[in-house]
Image (cartoon, rainbow, N blue to C red):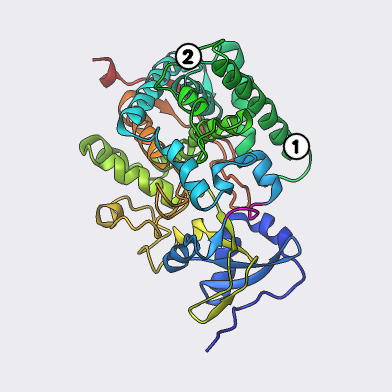
Amino acid sequence: MDNQIPREEGLDHSIALLKEGYNFILNRSQSMQSDIFETRILGKKAICMIGEEAAALFYDENKFQRNGAAPNRVVQTLFGKNSVQTLDGEEHRHRKEMLMSMMNPEEIEKLVEIVKMEWEHSIDQWAQMEQIVLYEEMKKLLCKAAFKWVGYPLHEDDVKVITKGIAAMFETPAVLGPTHWIGRSARNQIEKKIEGLIQEARNKQIMFSENTVLHKFAFYKDSNGNLMDGETVAVEVLNMLRPIVAIAIYMNFTVLALHNFPHEKEKLRNYSDYSQLFVQEVRRYYPFFPFVAAKVKTNFTWNGYKFEKGTLTLLDLYGTNHDPNIWGQPNEFKPERFARWKGSPFSFIPQGGGDYNNGHRCAGEWITIEVMKGSLDYLVKRLEYEIPEQDLSFNMDDIPSIPQSKIILKNVRRSLESLH
């Protein structure tokens, strides 16, 4: 027997989605007392889902496809044209293989060491300043580290402009008006720059070290055995750079967690393996991606609900990470919960769910975790700072959401412990 999917009344709820942000799906799921409901987004029917079972369904490639699902404004700013996030099937697996080739322990360790070097340089600079805006400083720090890692260290004069451009790619997709076009323009400009580097490498005008992202991607062949076009290579290089810079969002929330839950500092100082639990709880507790989109690939029925081919479907990432059916006391910050977590690819999905190699789970998730752990070590053991009075609140209707003040730190200096 077929069940009727609960339906939200009204002609369109796109404005409500922008106003409610991360809570849009969660609010309706709770009010309708259902993990699935139907609404209308951009004038079209959309199915919204939340929870571990829904995530397992959503990442079934026989039932859903990514191609054509994400709004054009998101593709043009966040992902890029013809990026891995927009592909399906064998083409997606082959492209993902290219990205995952840089996710081995040696490459991740190399990046983390570069990030630590940038922390060292930054601390010396910050110590000369009365105060810093952490979010802005972390974006620059991570941008410099990311470009060194991919094989093209930035000239210091270019850091500010390039950082601003890459940050605009993840800061503007959900913004209406001229600000969105800043993000789109920034992507186009940086893509062109990287595309030019790729062409110069292929023409042997410049050489990148063989173990770098730029070299491997420039000479990687698609599933037909051909070199990818330069534009697509540039898009995927940016898909390595952009998420690293976006870790600045998580680092702001890391400092906020250390401030709001000061008892956690002693655990981090005394237990070396506690940083993994702490970082995972930051990623679960605070907002990052609100949801992901796909389209129904073929008609099917699930739990008695009919899914029709072509229907837009949204999976709530933030809501699933706060689902009381999965997480006990989901609105409390409790890193210890990850000591018991079984590692389901569909219950903890801050950067998407499913399998890394064959599915759509974010290729950069391991990088995110390790960079956060390396940076957390500096914040807890190697750095001292003061947090003056400021607005540390964050809005759930801002995508991405960060503390209003972007966290101002005063009197930043090396800890006495780290000097000995």
204 vs 191, nearest the viewer: 204
**CA–CA distance in space, label 2 to label 1:** 33 Å
Question: Amino acid under label 2?
Answer: Gln
Residue 330 painted magenta? no
Q: Is residue 394 visible?
A: no
Q: Which secondary structure dominates the residues rendered in magenta?
A: loop
**Image quadrant in which you'd find residue 239:** top right
**Is 359 situated left or right of 66 in this image?**
left
Q: Secondary structure beneath disc 2?
A: helix
Q: Residue 181 carries which label?
A: 1
Magenta stretch, residue numbers: 66-70
> For this rendering, which residue is in front, 62 or 157?
62
Q: Which of marks 2 and 1 is in front?
A: 1
Neighbour tally class for label 1: few under 14, some 14-19, many 20 plus, Cα within 10 Å? some
Kindly identify which numbered label has been placed on residue 121: none
- Residue 343: x %, y % from top left: 31, 55
Residue 267 lies, in percent from the top left, at: 25, 41
Residue that carries the numbered disc 2 in the rendered image: 125
Residue 2: x %, y % from top left: 55, 86
The residue positioned 58% from the left and 15% from the top of the image is: 203
